[in-house]
Every structure is written in structure tokens, then in C-alpha cells.
Amino acid sequence: MASEEQLSAIKGAKVLMVGAGGIGCELLKTLALSGFEDIHIIDMDTIEVSNLNRQFLFRQKHVGQSKAKVAREAVLKFRPHIKITPYHANVKDPEFNVDFFKQFNVVLNGLDNLDARRHVNRLCLASGVPLVESGTTGFLGQVTVHVKGKTECYECQSKPAPKTYPVCTITSTPTKFVHCIVWAKDLLFAKLFGNKNQENDLNVRSTDASSSSEHSEDVFERRADEDFEQYGRRIYDHVFGYNIEVALRNEETWKNRNKPRPVYTRDVLPLRPVGQNGNKDKASTGDPSSVSAMASLGLKNPQDLWSLKENSEVFLEALRLFFLKREKEIGQLGFDKDDQLAVEFVTSAANIRAASFGIPLHSLFEAKGIAGNIVHAVATTNAIIAGLIVLEAIKVLQNDVKSYRMTYCLEHPSRKMLLMPVEPFEPNKSCYVCSETPLTLEINTHHSKLRDFVEKIVKAKLGMSLPLIMHGVALLYEVGDDLEEDEVANYAANLDKVLSELPSPVTGGTILTVEDLQQELKCSINIKHREEFDEEKEPDGMVLSGWTPALAAEKTKTSDNGPSSSNASQTVPLESEDNDEIEIILKDPEILAAGKKRKSSDVSVAVDSGIFSVTGEMLTKRKVEEDDSHNDIVMVDGNLDPNKKKRVQ
């Protein structure tokens, strides 16, 4: 039972939730049932079919609607007296500025990407509002507390590079080729060749009740009077043409994104049967699992980059061969990267989708390396993490600093515990975000342009959304809606100038001030001129020191989809972080942890969601050790002296 003091703190609190997905649904429910009476929710996503197995506030009828708004309606049905304010918007929108954040007592994150997490962290620091961060991957999860001046901020330590992807990104707004691979493999391949009764988001678009009767049937079912060519073209036109047109109807989605281009077979291929090129019979020799669309079409080198026309031919030919040569397997097939025809189908489908969204195409060899195991979210983990978030939020509201804990949810017991509480650390004095430590940039000031600096450093590495760059009192670059036309033109011209040729030249020894007015973040960058860079090790042509980059993982080819006797499976960073969706798993004999390599026998799997990795007796980022003078567990950075453990006082 909560004490009177706790109940008072809870009822008087004004809470901001960012994210209404897997963790967010559980969190909103738990907050409401715990007595919180003023809750605000920000989420830009709409509900997908694939959300329904764990985001329990949503139902089939809600598909396509705002997560934040539907979550509010669902909770008010059993807690009608509380106040819930939803925002169907991006937390990075200008309206959610420092003044907006200042009205809250605590901010609770349930986000699905690193960029948004960093943005919220900076707004919380600027507004002085405590942040409770969280994330889950399968059975693993963590909750951490970040209070300005008392604990380290979210960016004080390196984060695992992203490797999991929100389903809404996969189905609606892909920006990377890996998004297209996951779509082709986990949605399209599964729908066409897997269990027909298993729903996914392709079902929604093919049986949308609001659509015309022409599209009310399941287009993925082959009609009795259709030959393979007609069926293949109909599938192609539906998923790459019609579905894209449907997506384009939602103008709000594309306000700040590049619009995709619908692709139809009539635009790419003449109306003729595929496979009639003299090599057709090569596809049917040997074991059915070795059937190949490439062989049928005379394509030999898996490292060649196929054109859109060639990808379309491979797609239609692979589909034809599945029905012609492997019809008995259809309905029970799962993707296997050793299945040549499956890899060809997924590669071609991913490339066609990539072409539609303006994403660079990849070879079959590259696509096969990207495709990996799929691990879905576990609803119970989200519920556990949501409960832990609320516990930490109550401590924050009571200003009970000594009781703050970073808590890790493990898949297997460690020290007879599945929940591992750890005392938070003090702020990192070398953190450029919360300690304003100067950074150093090595760059060739005679060759590199201001655009390179803005894109590769200011935006990509420092995560600034609306940057302002100054050299002394000279303003070199600024972004904003309130700029005059001549100012916009002047800054645009500066972008294409070499650093040393700017109106206020940037050379070795220059100190640049970079500021984000929305995040109220400012940092200084010392410029160090350097003539040459290793193209392989330093592809950006510049090196930033003093910031906390994502932990790197060595690139290796996968040998199978599961653990082997020699190497434990390692979660390899690929692109974005996620709290409730898909995880890509690769194999790696070693893992880089806190600047040191540890054997894979010490590491079995990693938490993906933006903070740390936990497994068995080890944390892949920080080592758990017992303090001789206390019974509680503390964390020690891998690169710190174990005798110098810094707890929050």
C-alpha cells in the first residue's frame, strides 16, 4: 500500500509520457491504476495490426487511428475521472519546447528510436525536469533515472548502435534498405508462402473496408482462372502500386518526408511471360530447394546490382517458380537464408520497395547478409518495465534520490535475480551534453565543406535538429522558420563553401560554437586541421573526439540463424532502436564492451533499447561487481578503476 506521502505526490503530479506503443500502453494503464490524475501523451504513430498482440489498449477497429488518442479513450473507460491529454504529433515538433516541458513534474519515455530519446533527454536537461528512460527487447529490458546534476544523463555513456525497427516504419515509412528487407521477409514472404491464417499488416491494406469493392477480397489468394504471370503481376501491382497510393492519401505522414513513388508492372516490364530466355530449364534441376530465378533469367553474379527491371523480373520469376516447383511447401514456408529462391524473392521485393521510396538498391549478396533472425516483443516484459517506470517516477516525485535505481530485466537469473537493481552514476564530467565539455574535430579545412560538417557532425553525431553555427560573433549557418529570404540564401550558399573559404574562415585552431535553440543545447568544437584520412577506417573524412559514439560491432557473415556451439549469438547494431518490435540478430565471436573485448561465452544477447546490454553474469557495457563494504550491487565502467566507484549521493 502506498503511504499518504506517496499518494499525495502521485495525485498532485503532472506527468508527460512520450510513446504510446508496447511500453506506453502498459505504462498508461499502470499510471492510471496507481492514482495519477493528470497525464499527457505524445505519439506520432497510428495503430498497425501487428501492434494488437501486445498493445492491449487497441483493437482491430482502431487500426489506422492515432495511438495516443485511442489509448486515452481506452483508459478513460475504466478511469473516467482522470485527465489524459493526447498529442498525435512528433515530440521533435517546435511546439514541444523547453517551456512545454517545464510544466511537468516528470517525463517518462517509451520511445522507439535513439534520435528521439536524445532529443527528450536534452529538453529535460534544459527544463530541469527528471526523466525516466526505458526499453525492452524480447525478455530483456531496463529502466533508468536521469536527474540533472544528480545522475548521469541519457547521453553520458555510449549507447549500443541501433538494430531494431518499429513496425510502423517497416510498413509505412521505410528510410533504410534494412527496413525493406524486413518488410519483404517478415510481411510479404510470410503472407504469400507462410501460414495463410496468420494476419499481418498486408492483410489490412488488401481487405480495407473503406476501400472499393474491387479491393475487398484478399488479393493474395490466387484465382482459379489466373496463370502464374497474371497472378504475379497482380501481387506486384498491389503491394508496390496500390498500397503506395493508399499510403499517399495520408498527407500528414508526408509533410516532412519524401513521398514514395507507386510502381506498377506496366511501367517496368512489357506484358510477356517471364522465364522465356532460353535458360528456363536451369531453374528446375536438382533439389527443389536449389531452384533459382537467377538461373532461369541468366543472372550469374550475386554481387551484381540489379536494375529495377531486373529486380521485377526476378520477383515475378521467383513467385512463378515457388508455385510451379514448390507448391506443396506453400502455406508452411519460413524464410531461410540458405534457401536460394527465398533469398532471391526477398532481395527483389526489397529492392523494388527501396526504389519506390528512393532508397539505394543492394545486391543479392548484400541483402542476404542483412537478412537475419526475427525476435518479436514479449508483452510481459513491457508490463514489468512499465511497473518499474512507475516505481521510479514515484521516487522522483518524492525527491528520494538515495532510492533511485537503474533496473535491468534479465532473461535468465543472475545471482538468483531476474530483476537487477543498480545505483545510478553521477554525471559524466566529460559529457558534452550535460557538462558542456568542449569537443575536438580533426578535419581537412581546405577540402571539407560546411555541408559536410553540418550533415556528418552536427546532425548525425550530435543529434541537433535546428542547429546554429557561430565562429566568434560571425553566424555561419542557421535553421528556422523566422529567417528572411536573403538570410536563407546566404546560409545555403555557405553550405557549399569549403571551411577555409567561409566569410569567417574556419582553419586549424578555430573554435566553433554549435547550438540548438529548440533543445537549448550549446557546445564548443575545437577545429584541428588534418591533411589525410584513412578512407576505410575514417570514411567521413573527419574525426570527432570527446563525444560518446555508439559501440561498434565488427562486420561478420552469418553462418546460421541460431546459436552454435562455438559462438553465442550477439545482437549486432544495424540502424535504429526499438522498444517493442523487430530485432536483427547476427553472429560475432567477440563483442566490444566498454572499450574492451569480451569473449562471446560471457555474452549471450544484448538489450537494444538505448541504454545497456545485460546477460548472465555480465553487462556488455558495464560490469556488475559486489562492493566489499555494501551488500547492494553497483556498476563499474569497464574503463574505470574498480576502486573508484561513483554512486549518487
Image: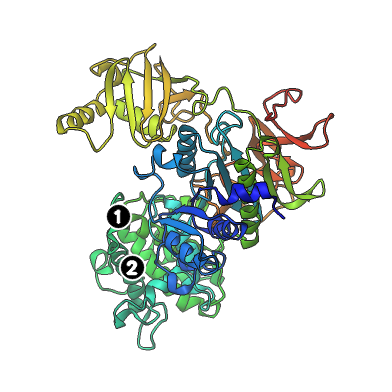
Residue 645 drawn at (x, y percent): 72, 26
Q: Can you say whether 505 is above or below 456 in the image?
A: above
Circles 2 and 1: CB atoms closer than 8 Å: no
Mark 1: few, some, or many residues within 10 Å (few <14, many ≥20)?
A: some
Above or below 13: residue 467: above
Residue 260's quadrant in the figure?
bottom left
Quadrant where the image shows the C terminus: top right
Q: Name the residue under label 2.
A: 243
Q: What element carries label 2?
A: helix
Q: In this view, does 482 lie to the left or right of 595?
A: left
- Identified at 65% across, 36% down, the residue is 621
In primary-sequence order, the first of circles 2 and 1 is: 2
Q: Is residue 55 left or right of residue 254?
A: right
Residue 297: x and y, percent?
A: 38, 64
Q: Residue 254 carries which label?
A: 1
Toward which corner of the image does residue 147 lie, by quadrant?
A: top right
